[in-house]
Amino acid sequence: MKIAVIGTGNVGSTLGRRWANNGHQVVFCSRTPDSERVRGLVGASGPNASAAGVSEGVATSDVVVLATPWPAALASIEAAGNLQGKIVVDCTNALKEDLSGLSIGDGTSGAEQVAQRAKGAHVVKAFNTISSLTMADPLFGRERADLFLCGDDADAKRTVAQLAQELGFELVDAGPLRAARYLEYLAMLWVHLAYKQNWGPNFIFKTVRR
C-alpha cells in the first residue's frame, strides 16, 4: 500500500517507519523534505521510505496519515491538494497549548473539521488515544493495546483496521465519524493522566467485556 505521512514528529515517524518495515511504500511529507532530519528519518526507515513535499507525496498515495500538531493540521489538509477518494487517517488532537482542554467547542470534533476540508476523502479517526511508545510496541504483557477508530466509510475503516492490526493492535470500532467527539475527549483524559497526574506516557486504555 502507498501511504503518505504528513508530519515527521514522534507519531508520524513511528507509524511511517513501522509500516515501511512491513513492506508498504511510505512517503514522509514535509515542508522541508530535503532537511537533514527528514533525510535521517528516511534512512532509518529503510528502502521502502522516501520524502516529498506535502502535495507531491499525497498525490501518489492511497492512504494519507495526518500526524501534525493541531495548529498545523487544517493547513496541512489544504496543502495536500486533491484528496478525492483517498483515505485520511486523522491522528490529531485539538489540545490547548497548556494541555488544559480541547481548543474546539462542543458539537464538533477535530476529525469532523478535517473532513469538512478534505473534500471527497474518507476520514477515519485513529491513533489519537495512545502515545508513540505504544505505537512502537503495542504489547503490554500478554495484552495488546486497543486501537479506537471511527469513520463513516466501512471500506476505509477496514483498511485502517488492517494497517493497525499489522502493527499488533486490537481494534475497537467506535462507529461513525461523529464518535470522534468522544475519542478526542478520551485522548484528553489520557493527556491529563499522563502529564497532569504524572503517570507518564507508557499506559493504555483497555476495553474488557463479558
Image (tube, rainbow, N blue to C red):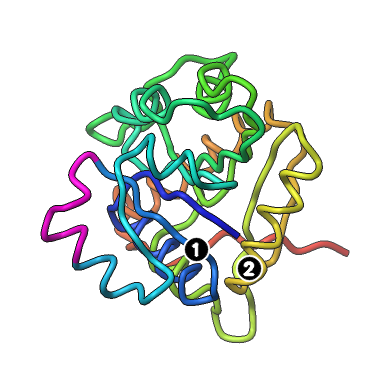
Give the residues in magenta.
Answer: 31-39
Q: Is residue 68 above or below residue 164?
A: above
Residue at point 34%, 38% (across, down): 54
Q: Is residue 123 above or below residue 107?
A: below
Tell me residue 30's x, y (percent). Answer: 27, 44
78 to the left or right of 210: left
Tell me residue 15's x, y (percent). Answer: 44, 62
Q: Quadrant of residue 144?
A: bottom right
Q: Is residue 198 magenta?
A: no
- Which quadrant holds the C terminus? bottom right
Which residue ends up furthest to the left in the rendered image?
36
Residue at point 25%, 66% (across, down): 41
Other-residue count near label 1 (Cα within 10 Å), few / some / many at <14 / 14–19 / ≥20: some
Which residue ends up furthest to the bottom in the rendered image?
142
Instruction: Name the mark nearer the viewer: 2 or 1.
Output: 1
Viewer-proximal residue, 149 or 37? 37
**Residue denoted by label 1:** 25
Q: Secondary structure at mark 2?
A: loop
Q: Is residue 37 magenta?
A: yes
Q: Quadrant of residue 122?
A: top right
Other-residue count near label 2 (Cα within 10 Å), few / some / many at <14 / 14–19 / ≥20: many
Tell me residue 166's x, y (percent). Answer: 63, 71
Residue at point 31%, 48% (across, down): 52
**Residue denoted by label 2:** 169
Q: Is residue 61 above or below residue 102?
A: below
Q: Secondary structure at mark 1?
A: strand
Tell me residue 5's x, y (percent). Answer: 42, 50
> In whole angstroms, how far apart are the C-alphas of marks 2 and 1?
21 Å
Amino acid type indicated by mark 2: Phe
